[in-house]
Image: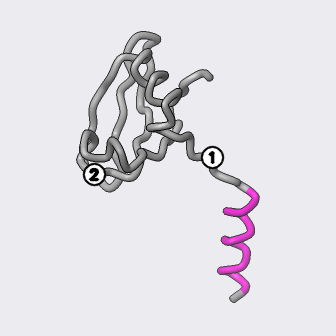
Amino acid sequence: MSIETGMKYQISQNIKGNFNSAESLTVTTNNGITVQFTLEDGKGHGSMPLDHLHYLLKRSNLTPITSNKRVLLNTDHEEKIG
């Protein structure tokens, strides 16, 4: 799995303490060796080796969050109607 800038990951309960109890993190840069990220709700930022991020994904400590654009568009449309 390729790690790209802007990707968002949900943090599992097991390791939230290592990430200031944040629910998710977003990748800000990936230089092929190190990944920099920000934590949700302004809870901080950090970096880790790319290999470690892959390890956390493999162990299901981080789960990719995929946004469904269709759902977002439908929600916006419903708000304008209502």
Range of magenta residues:
70-81
Where does the image place residue 79, in percent across and percent down from the top left?
65, 80
Identity of the residue drawn at 25% across and 45% down: 17
Magenta stretch holds residue 34: no
Q: Secondary structure beneath disc 2?
A: loop
**Compared to 78, does 16 lie above or below?**
above
Amino acid, disc 1: Thr
**Compared to 27, does 78 lie above or below?**
below
Report whether 38 appears left or right of 64.
left
Q: Nearer the viewer, residue 51 or 42?
A: 51
Amino acid, disc 2: Ser
Where does the image place residue 75, in percent across and percent down from the top left?
68, 71
Instruction: Give the distance between the C-alpha atoms of the residues marked 2 and 1, in whole angstroms.
Output: 21 Å
Q: Nearer the viewer, residue 45 or 80?
A: 45
Marks 2 and 1: which is nearer the front? 2
Q: Nearer the viewer, residue 62 or 39?
A: 62
Report whether 79 appears left or right of 21.
right
Where does the image place residue 29, in percent across and percent down from the top left?
42, 25
Q: Secondary structure beneath disc 1?
A: loop
The majority secondary structure of the magenta stretch comes to helix
Specify few, some or many for label 2: CA neighbours under 10 Å numbering under 14, 14-19, or 20 or more: some
Looking at the rendering, which quadrant does residue 77 occupy?
bottom right
Report whether 36 appears left or right of 6.
left
In the drawing, what numbered circle is on residue 75?
A: none
Looking at the rendering, which quadrant does residue 55 occupy?
top left
Task: State the residue lying farthest toward the top.
Answer: 33
Where does the image place residue 10, in percent across and percent down from the top left?
47, 46
In the drawing, what numbered circle is on residue 21?
A: 2
Residue named by callout 1: 66
